[in-house]
Image (spheres, grey):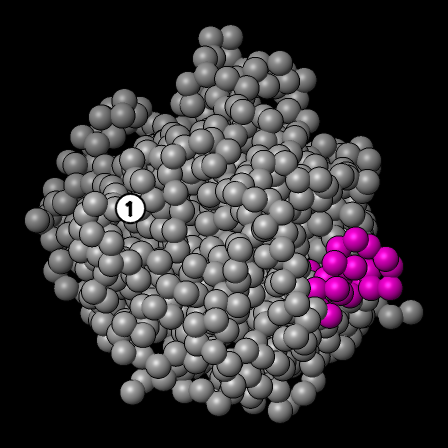
Amino acid sequence: MTRVALFATCFNDAMWPGTPIATVTLLERLGVEVDFPAAQTCCGQMFTNTGYADEAIPRVRSFVEVFGGYDAVVAPSGSCTGSVREQYADLARRSGDAGLSRAVAEVAPKVYELSEYLVDVLGVTDVGASFPHRVTYHPTCHSLRMLHVGDRPLRLLREVRGIDLVELPAATECCGFGGTFAMKNADVSVAMGSDKVRHIRDTGAEIVVAGDNSCLAHIGGLLGRQRAGVRTMHLAEVLASTAEASA
Amino acid sequence: MSARHTGPVAATTPTFIGMPKFPALAREALGNTQQRRNLAFATQTIRGKRAAVVGEVGDWEALRLNGAAVKDEVLAHLDDYLIQLEDKLTAAGTTVHWARDAAEANRIVVELVRGKGVDEVVKVKSMATQEIELNEALEEAGIAAWETDLAELIVQLGNDRPSHILVPAIHRGRAEIRDIFRTRMAAAGRPAPETMTDEPAQLAEAARLHLREKFLRAKVGISGANFAIADTGTLVVLESEGNGRMCLTLPETLISVVGIEKVLPTWEDLGTFLQLLPRSSTGERMNPYTSIWTGPADGDGPQETHVVLVDNGRTHVLADPVGRQALRCIRCSACLNVCPVYERAGGHAYGSVYPGPIGAVLTPQLRGIDNPIDASLPYASSLCGACFEVCPVRIDIPRLLVNLRTQVVDAHRGRPSAEGLAMKSAAWMFAEPGRWASMQKGITASSKLLRGKRTLQHLPWPGSVWTDARNAPVPPRETFRQWWQRTHGESR
Amino acid sequence: MTTAREEVLARIRAAGAARPVEVPPAPEPSPQPAPETVDLFAENVADYRAVVERLAESAVPQRISSALGQYGVTSVVVPDGLPSGWLTDAALRVLADERLTAYDLDAIDAVVTQAAVGIAETGTIVLDHTAGQGRRALSLVPDVHLCVIRADQVVGDVPAAVRQLRPAVETGRPLTWISGPSATSDIELNRVEGVHGPRHLHVLIVGDEA
Ligand code: SF4
């Protein structure tokens, strides 16, 4: 049986448990044995991207220790996966510890974002989901331009039974979240988000789906303030769903 | 490894000293709806054009890889290439000058112009001369420097600052331009025609008439260079309007101010860069005019040519192993045009002649991070990566931004700050899974206190920065870790 | 006292940037031009709003005269080395380049030149300012530029042109690359033809009548 370690990510773990739960449900349904190493905490992305490299380095160390023994690690987050795959090498170099650099080089390529894991490792696009709703998909920047997941999420969504998938105009434009950018440059962040939300509302979708809950919190926060009646949902939750038409 | 203070940086010139930080400047720009409309329209248009002509090229990625590596090769052996360039320039009859910084470069140019006994020069658009504020230095010496690129002319007549690398007046609409021409042209020379409307063709015609007399009588021209070829001693200038050709051809003396990173090793390297630059920049297969010269040509054009090689902080950038790739930049402005932050904040918010993503990485490296505006630039990005995707020389701008953020934080370590404290406690909490698990108990407890609320509308500061415009999520009643424990039992 | 030169070079050496760099090759220049190359050239020159005509050698004088007539040209400057016999129209004032000043050129309507290379992929004409092309000011100041290029001078792409032009550069020749008439997009990114350079570019492609 295929075995995978779940990297839940700290934000999902504490704030959006529905997403890692859906990830577990989905993977188990596909016959994968999921392990959740309890020693995991945070990948350190928030530290890295704000400039706190010294605080991030211990997270790198702990990540390679916790996940080093697995053949594959899956995370329901494009940006946390990106942080491990694309940023850990620079942090390890900064630490001056050649052993850490070697460990990163070994572990990082085995970390997959959910859609990559499903399509590339498991080789499935039809995950047996059913979700009878009008949905639009926002490709988050880190999944799109850092990980290059391409159309994998869309290929997965297209196979979902009952789904009415509508194209999002200007989809590849950033929503304006950007981690601490949302706080440090709140005005520009909100201006970007407002345009994203306008495009989402223009689609007439009930639900906007993405692969990162942090971006969705920003988008959802704006939608909620506007009382737009559009919900946000993580890709994993749609793919885990087996709801029938009455939902 | 921090490269801070390993070498002399460029001065933050008086124009930009004491500027507020990026967020404040951006907030102001967001309030200017006219400018926002101009910018959104302009950047969207040019994005489309670029994508179309880049799509025509068979193997764009191979061109980018070659372009990036050629520039890296130059940077790895910059001393050798500069010496070779100097030899070839000299052999071709060009006089070469070196300048450590802006002040020295300006001094050299002012002296050369004075030596010609003239009180005016015509200028081709050049980022290097803007960076060193040459016009101001010439003015101080009683020499009028006429900008001849249309957008530069609009900026100069309007007493304004450029807001884009390629189209410095991108923030101005046609009606504003008409007003500037009507009220300001007369004081600088030939006035705008009485009948001029705000039609772009008529505005361009007014500029043609206004500048022609200046071109015809000019004795000294000043330019930059897009490329300087080491193995032939050749300079290259790309442009569209013909103002460049005028400045490079009609005067008797030509002075070119060239940043030391502009070198290309061989003539053949142009084969790559003359594809990368126009397609990335104006979104054309080729820009209307490219002028190429190798010293003075017999009986053709300026008979006296000078090159001023300028450092002005570039060697400081070179000393940063990660940041040095910013020196590959060929100033195409593609990264500005795709940047969602630039599109909304505008160019002036970046407090430098280099706006947008490249400005956010180049300015703090050239000038250091001691000024508030310079230290705020690395944070003026959501790290969306659109800039890296289009950059013709593959500058990984998000990575450079993160590298600079680290330098900003490192420079402030030891000084107490709310952010530093928050990061420290978060780091402490994540260091032990047990601490993180008990933190989660607090999270779920707070959820119970919030009883049934689904979102939060108002949080006290600093949460208010979020909730001013966005609802905040409510913590869950059970975290994932707790769920896993309950459903899957003890894990390893 | 160290000179600026010594100091800048010393700073570069102190920056510790020296390392071997592997430069992947640029894509190969397109092979020897095929007949379609000239078609593509004509198409791309026209795409940037120059006027393009294809004709046989024998028709050159007549076409030059009708093209100049089209723009109402009454005076034209000709560079040294332009084939005599190309400008036959008795009504035209034809001036040789005899120490003409910029002001003189400004009073002349048009220029007729040949070219060194044409580039199909970009619709570019390259002048190396040898015989038949004149010094740079000639093809710059007058408002109409009529350029005669032979079909066999057209190469496929930019790298091919660059390779071919090395000897010209090595002998110190300046080059002017021209892709359409002068233009600006500085006002609301609206393209306007004709700012400071010739507002009309008219290209005759000779010897390969399509
Ligand atoms: S950083 Fe890249 S995209 Fe931006 S101006 Fe420079 S070369 Fe162009």
Q: Name the one closer to the observer, B350 or B447.
A: B447
Q: Is residue B203 magenta?
A: no
Rendered location of residue B130, percent (x, y): 67, 44
- In the figure, B373 relative to B323: above or below? above
Q: Secondary structure at mark 1?
A: strand
In the picture provided, is C205 more to the left or to the right than C8? left
Residue B348 sits in quarter: top right
- Residue at x-position 82% and y-position 37%: B141
Residue A120 visible in this rendered orientation of the protein: no
Amino acid type at mark 1: Val
Part of the protein shown in magenta: B403-428
Residue B354 falls left or right of residue B60: right
Looking at the image, is A220 positioned above or below residue B153? below
Name the spot of residue C82 as percent of width and height, x first.
30, 47
Q: Which residue is mark 1?
A: A135
Give me the residue at 53% from left, 68% from top: B482
Q: Residue furthest left?
A: C210
Residue B375 image offset from top left, x and y in percent:
74, 53
User: Horizontally, is B379 left or right of A211 in the view?
Assistant: right
Residue C80, above or below A95: above
**At 52% across and 69% down in the image, what residue appears?**
B481
